[in-house]
Image: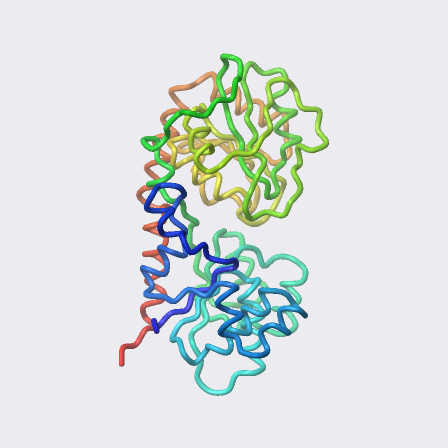
Amino acid sequence: MNPVLLTISGVIDPDIEGQIVRGERPEADYVAMAREFNADLLDYDDARQRGGWLARPLEKIGGKNLMMAWTCFKLRKQYQVIFTDGEQIGLPFAFFLKFLNIGDRAQHLMIVHILSVGKKMMLLDYFRLQSHIDTFFAYATWQKKFIEERWNVPPERVVFTPFMVDSDFFSPERAVNTLELNLPDQPIICSVGLEFRDYPTLIEAVRGLDVQIVIAAGSPWSKREDSTADQDIPDNVLVRRFTQHELRDLYAMSAFMVMSLYDVNFQAGVTALLEAMSMGKAIVCSSTPGQTDVVVEGETGLYVPPEDAKALREKIVELLDKPDEAERMGTNGRHRITTYMNLSHYVTRLNTFIQPHIHTV
């Protein structure tokens, strides 16, 4: 048994490592984390097996994440660190630790996606669960500051860590350029994802421009509805879904990428931003409170006010008119990824907070 337990909010494909080796998909963050941390992985199937007789009734009552949290609690004395991959598991696990635990327990480290929403704030406000989350890892500086100020958590326990991308998979050299879109001979720009994407503003901004917009309105994680659904789609906008290999080719053939977001306070859009930057593409991004940590203004891209079609159109035209500037920003973006925000840097950075808690016998 390894000293660290790492939760996975899903079911691990038994062929995941083979798919990575064959280049069929990016390396999964949890595969790299398990290797770097010397961790055991716990997915939903494993949690049912290891959670004892109470696991399945809890899953029926409260869902898979509650069941996973219970299994973490049951295993709390068998590991030195339990690393929960999001608050959906971390908060109920902290509840069990606070009100049911007696004696020693593993250190609890938790990834934070967004805590500034109703039910999560209530759990922390009323039950003070922050006392049993030893380290918060926040992907947005806005969330870090919010946690520190609202619940008086010391800054050293709330760590800002940039999100990551597999820069080997999303690399300009790996694009095969076999994607056929049958578009007119015009510049192409792309926009990718579903989570809080403001596609109505983007569509209005590009209506009538001499450019083709490809919107990849899909996500393996988001449950949000596609905001293009009820729109009057102009002739220069194509909306469809893509595989990860096709997305890589789409980034490669695009002049740059546009991330049009609603005004949110967490890092919506971060995965697509990092993928595009890793492919050497400049970014035009909505300057929301939660999305200020990836793009560097004037160096890797341009920010625009959220939900402002006129401002967005101006920035898109600016980069279309200055392809050399877009190329410079794209090159800078690729460099920023490979030196600071790729998967290797991510797992190494997190491991510096895990290893102090590991004690050899």
Q: How is the image coloured?
A: rainbow
Q: Residue shown at 38%/56% (left/top)?
A: 31
Q: Position of residue 203 (x, y in %)?
A: 63, 26
Tell me which residue sits at (48%, 60%) in the image.
8
Q: How many marks?
A: 0
Left or right, residue 2 beside residue 129: left
Location of residue 324 (image quadrant): top left
From this view, report whether residue 35 is shown above or below residue 312: below
Quarter of the image with the C terminus is bottom left
Describe residue 317's horizontal placement relative to residue 32 as left or right. right
69 on left or right of 79: right
The residue nearer to you, when weighing 219 against 359, is 219
Asked if residue 15 shows in the view, the reply is yes
Q: Percent from the top left, x then y, of residue 18? A: 35, 49
From this view, report whether residue 53 is shown above or below residue 227: below
Quadrant where the N terminus sits is: bottom left
Asked if residue 351 is positioned above or below residue 50 in the image, the reply reads above
What is the quadrant of residue 251 in the picture? top left
Residue 110 shows up from this direction: no
Which residue in the rendered view is the most extreme toward the left? 361
Residue found at x 62% / y 69%:
59
Q: Position of residue 146 (x, y in %)?
A: 56, 58
Q: Tell me residue 358's x, y (percent).
A: 32, 73
